[in-house]
Amino acid sequence: MQHKRRAQEEIVGFVLIVVLVVIVLVIFLGISLRNPKPQQRESEIIYQFLESSMEQTTNCSLSEGASYLPLDDALRECHETGSSCADGMSSCDSSEDTLKKILNNSFAVGPAYPYKGYDISAVYVVNASGQQQVEPVLNITAGNCSNSYSGNSYWIPSFPGSIIVSAKLCG
Amino acid sequence: MEILQSVRYSKGQFKIQQMVFVLVATMIFFGIVAVFYVSIRLGSIKGDVQDERQEAVIAQVRKMSGTPEFIWSAWEDCASCVDIDKVFLLKNRTSYQGFWKDVALLKLVRVYPRYQTSECTTVSYPRCNEITLIEKPGYQSYEAFVSLCRYDGAIEQSRCELGKVVIGFEGVEGAA
């Protein structure tokens, strides 16, 4: 009778250990699956997108009869002078409008799509007397962006600094 | 006395056997957990490798815009610019049939602005969205962003628009 009880106690002890280990593992797995590591990936596709988009001819010409500016020149004009186009729109508005239309046609974003959102920004960066100065030029966002995204950036020379256009596509 | 000794001996054996069973069960349990963990890790690594490969293929597809049949030579510093007029002229050229080996699909697609007509013809060009040079069944396709450039007589200057070059390789079914 005593032997039987002892054996039962041992089995209960073993089962308890197994149950404890399983609970710890389930908690560990639950935490690691619920909070996936944020992934930031450099994307060739986004670089190609930015590079090709910057060649897009905008509706902005600086005067009647002058040539229509490509998007990179419109962004440069937006930062350097902020001048208006011949149609009355500012160069900043014209570049933002063109980029928004391009983005709408290129990437469908939303909860039902592979990409949940995007964040495009253009900043002017210049190194003046050893210090880096950053001035915002343009920012376009849509949908929801978490810490996981693929992105890249494209540099437009604008003496003495550069305009850096960065794009993030959030998954 | 002899009987008692033999009983003690078999009880010890039973204890050892019990411990071995517990150890083996524990090892199997942790083994299964380890296999489960490794399979999850390997799954994510496989995904990363596939992404890297796809990016490499897309970079190769992009190089098509630099070939003499596609390149926009009016501007020297535009690596992504494709001469859409030149590509449209290639569309029905019999001398270019079989020129691109192992390619089952080759087309240019306009991304922005979009027009109502899909495939470009001599009537609809340039207000159309696609120029298909090759289309055969059975391929896996990859696309890369390019700039579609041409001289626009209406504004008397070159006009570039965002597009894609789409290439499908023979022998692999299903689209990317």
Image (cartoon, coloured by chain):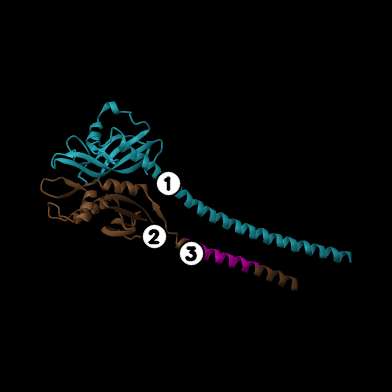
Question: Mark 1 belongs to which amino acid?
Answer: Glu
Report whether mark 1 lies on the same chain as mark 3: no
- What residue is pinned by disc 1? B52
Q: Is residue A12 left or right of residue A38?
A: right
Query: How far separated are the C-alphas under marks 1 and 2?
Result: 20 Å
Where is B46 relative to A32, above or below?
A: above
User: Which residue in the structure is indicated by mark 3?
Assistant: A31
**Do dots 1 and 2 share one subunit?**
no
Q: Residue at x 30, y 53 (%)?
A: A164
Q: Amino acid at mark 3?
A: Ile
Residue at 14 percent across and 52 percent down: it is A85
Q: How many marks?
A: 3
Q: Are marks 1 and 2 in contact (CB under 8 Å)?
A: no
Cβ–Cβ below 8 Å for labels 1 and 3? Answer: no
Q: Which residue is mark 2?
A: A147
Toward the viewer: B61 or A62? A62
Q: Earlier in the sequence, mark 3 or mark 2?
A: 3
Estimate the spatial distance between the alpha carbons at disc 3 and disc 2, rounded to whole Å. 17 Å
